[in-house]
Amino acid sequence: MAFNDMLIKLYNLEFDWSTIQAQAAKGVEIGKPIGPDRRRLLEWIAAHFPASWQGELERALCNTPISCFIAQRDSSLLGFSCYDATALGYFGPIGVIESARNSGTGTALAQACLLDMRLKGYGYAIVGMAGAREFYRKLADAMEIPDSAPGIYR
């Protein structure tokens, strides 16, 4: 099943830092990976998520500056979020391991990326083939882009 892309108006977003602060209070650090994280992160992605996400993460790690964020607790990876990985202006992929889902980690990772995009001057973010549509609607009032499937992924 192909999903339509979604559009997020970055200029309308009000960033709620409480989600990132709440993660910090739980011992979860949200930040950009550094060079030594690269191999560990790529291996972790390969073990937990679809194979295509590893290529997108590799692209985000090669961008200057890096266009991804990771969540970790005590050096254990919990999740990641990227942008400008598939194409410029695209947000995603985003993934959180099952044991850390529904804890606000995904929301915090998404907000970190979307703020980074906004600070770089992007007015919009496109979520390609958005499967978690309700998540994006709740997070950023994202709207479906009609007739956009399969879009760039054909």
Image: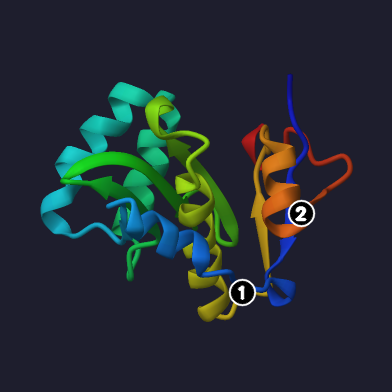
Residue 121 position (above or below residue 35) = below
Residue at image x 74%, y 19%?
1
Question: Can you tell which quarter of the image residue 153 is in?
Answer: top right
Total marks in image: 2
Q: Earlier in the sequence, mark 1 or mark 2?
A: 1
Q: Quadrant of residue 64?
A: bottom left
Instruction: Estimate the x, y position of residue 43 in percent, counting from the top left.
Output: 22, 31
Mark 1, mark 2: which one is toward the viewer?
2
Residue 145 point in image, percent of width and height: 83, 48
Q: Tell me where residue 137 appears, x and y as whole percent.
A: 76, 49
Local secondary structure at mark 2: loop
**Circle 1 residue:** 122
Q: Which residue is mark 2?
A: 142
Residue nearest the observer in this picture, 121 or 107: 107
Nearer the observer, 154 or 51: 51
Q: Classify residue 66 as left or right of residue 149.
A: left
Please, what is the three-letter code of the amino acid marked with disc 1?
Tyr
Check the image and report above or below for 31 versus 10.
Answer: above
Q: Residue furthest front?
A: 25
Label 2 crowd (10 A; few <14 / some 14-19 / many >=20):
many
Q: Residue at x 55, y 53 (%)?
A: 87
